[in-house]
Image: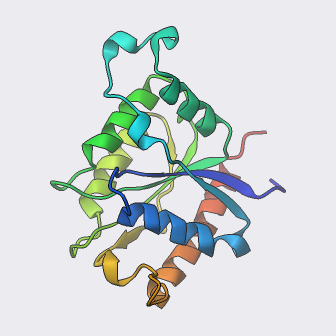
Amino acid sequence: MSHSARFLGIAGSLRQNSYNFQLLEALQKSTTQEQIDLEIYQGLSTIPLFNEDMRPVEKRPAAVLNLCEKIENVDGVVIATPEYAQSVPGVLKNLLDWISISPALNEKPVAILGGTTGVWGTRYAQASLRHTLVAMGAFTMQRPMVFVNDIKSQLPTPDQPISPDLEQRLDAFAHGMKKWVRLHAKD
């Protein structure tokens, strides 16, 4: 793979100024030296609730079809998940339910990271997400793992730079993403 690895980043939160969206932005900024092109998906709020009656392709919402096409046209996906009730947020699970009825994530390299204001840093949510992605046939990157606790104090703001620890972890994560895509590149 001689070109930059192209990734679609998905933040599993609808909240304006979501910490996990900001985490993807920080990853995007840290990846220039790693030759990773990261586009951050902005259409999560356009995805309707999953409805089995809309399973046939001709009945699927345009937003779902467009997202699946985006996924099929990148080398890999990176998901930044918040954690609610020790699991992935419902909006992210809903998105994955829609994707699961398409082949978009089958054998697609996927990386997971996440952050929370608490002390656990999305450990449970990432484990739950990993389980779902394996069931969908995605090639889920095993490591490095990035669990960001106390995320508010680590993300960059106008008054403070990104924490050196988080910056270093994101650089290692980006490097791992590139290697993971190369390992699973289709001829």
* Colour mapping: rainbow
Task: Give residue 33's quadrant in the image.
Answer: bottom right
Q: Residue at x 41, y 28 (%)?
A: 98
Quick check: 140 left or right of 154? right
Q: Residue furthest left?
A: 85
Is there any visible trace of residue 135 in the rendered image? no
- Total labels: the figure holds 0
Q: In this view, does 12 lie to the left or right of 142?
A: left
Relative image position of residue 90 (x, y in whole percent): 26, 42
Picture quadrant of residue 117: bottom left
What residue is shown at x 32% (from left), y 55% (from top)? 15
Image quadrant in which the C terminus is located: top right
Looking at the picture, how far across and down is residue 44, in whole percent? 42, 42
| Residue 29 visible somewhere in the drawing | yes
Based on the displayed image, in which of its 4 quarters is residue 3 positioned? bottom right
**Residue 135, x across and y down, in percent:** 39, 35
Q: Which residue is painted at 21% across and 73% down in the image? A: 118
Identify whether 80 is placed above or below 130: below
Q: Is residue 187 above or below residue 80?
A: above
